[in-house]
Amino acid sequence: MTTTAPPPATVLERRYRRLLLAYPRTYRTAHGDELLDVLLESAGPGRTVPAAREAWGLLTGGVRSRIAHQATGSAWADGLHLGVTAVAAANLAALLPYVGAMPLWTLLSAIALLAVLRGRVAAALPLSLVTGVKAVAIADGRQVFDLTLVPVDPSLLTDHALFADSSPLAVASRYAVVLLGLLVLASRRREAPRVRSWWWYAVAVAAAWAGPVWMADDTMFPLSLSRLAVEAAALGLAAAACYLARDHRWALASGIYLLVTSVELTMHAEELTRQHLAYWGVLAVLALGAACAPFRQRRHCLD
């Protein structure tokens, strides 16, 4: 018995398949071929490029499908894990510029984030605790575990010494939120945390960059424009997800991150400028938008 090979994919089919990548894998497995057949049948003869309306519809539909796929399981547990992930990524971003002077501790922070991303709470707890104790000790000018030359000079991404513009309490608060969140998640043995995307490492690298400069050189507590852009984009996506899915898990994560940022700014209350307040205001508005978005009214067709 002979089998015939399937006909080679056309240019239009390959481009439709790339657009279908916007949908989750489970959706593509169940409905991808059927949807592709409908698209190819409705396409005009000789067409090699999807219509702009079709491409936009596939991309937005894929995003909606992915968001709906994420809005499953316990909303508060998933939101807590997402908030812990964001703070853990910020903790790694604080150490990344000093990888040349502290390779071991930067690596441990990266592994701790990996454990959080993969939902390995039991492994993330001790890694986050050890890394947090070391970070707080450096911020306080103390020696713990090994000898570290203080101040710790950067090797890339910034020109400021490690925690030169921060305080031990602010550093401790970030790690305390991670540890408390992990402890709560560890108590939920029935449901393991969701596996997160590897893109969180790219987020940490972008947030670690100290430029572009948008504050005066003599600012006591400078904040980079790249950090503002990354955080505003993340909280904006969280608000959009809450709007589309009518789910509060992203709002909870935004609130956790806003809490950590608020504590950090409060520790430097005497050094804040209008730019600091504008920075906090942007994050607060986005977090509030995420909290209110799930309450939007449904639209009904008129009879």
Image (spheres, rainbow, N blue to C red):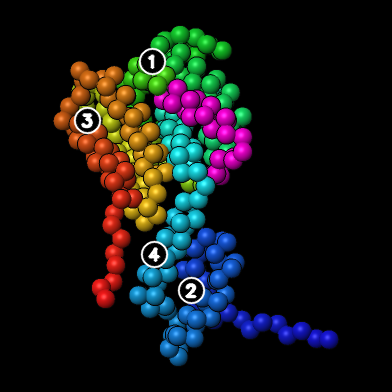
Residue 124 shows up from this direction: no
Amino acid type of the residue tagged 4 in the rendering: Thr
Q: Dot 1 lies on which element?
A: helix
Q: Nearer the viewer, mark 2 or mark 1?
A: 1
Residue found at x 70% / y 82%: 5
Badge 1 density bin: few <14, some 14–19, many ≥20, Cα 10 Å? some
Badge 3 density bin: few <14, some 14–19, many ≥20, Cα 10 Å? some
Q: Which residues are magenta?
A: 174-196
Q: Dot 4 lies on which element?
A: helix
- Residue identifier under label 2: 15
Q: Quadrant of residue 204?
A: top left
Please report whichever mark, 3 or 4, sits nearer to the chain's N-terminal start.
Answer: 4
In the rendered image, the quadrant that contains the C terminus is: bottom left
Above or below, 53 against 83 in this view is: below
In the rendered image, the quadrant that contains the N terminus is: bottom right
Which one is nearer the viewer's eye here, 262 or 158?
262
Please report whichever mark, 1 or 3, sits nearer to the chain's N-terminal start.
Answer: 1
Above or below, 191 against 19 in this view is: above
Please report whichever mark, 2 or 3, sits nearer to the chain's N-terminal start.
Answer: 2
| Gap in angstroms between the C-alphas marked 3 and 4 | 35 Å
User: Residue 168 got which mark?
Assistant: 1
Which one is nearer the viewer's eye here, 258 or 12?
258
**Residue contact at pointers 1 and 3, CB within 8 angstroms:** no
- Residue identifier under label 4: 60
Please report whichever mark, 2 or 1, sits nearer to the chain's N-terminal start.
Answer: 2
Amino acid type of the residue tagged 2 in the rendering: Arg
Residue found at x 45% / y 85%: 42
- Residue identifier under label 3: 276
| Gap in angstroms between the C-alphas marked 1 and 4 | 44 Å
Q: Is residue 206 left or right of residue 213?
A: right
Q: Nearer the viewer, mark 3 or mark 4?
A: 4
Badge 4 density bin: few <14, some 14–19, many ≥20, Cα 10 Å? some
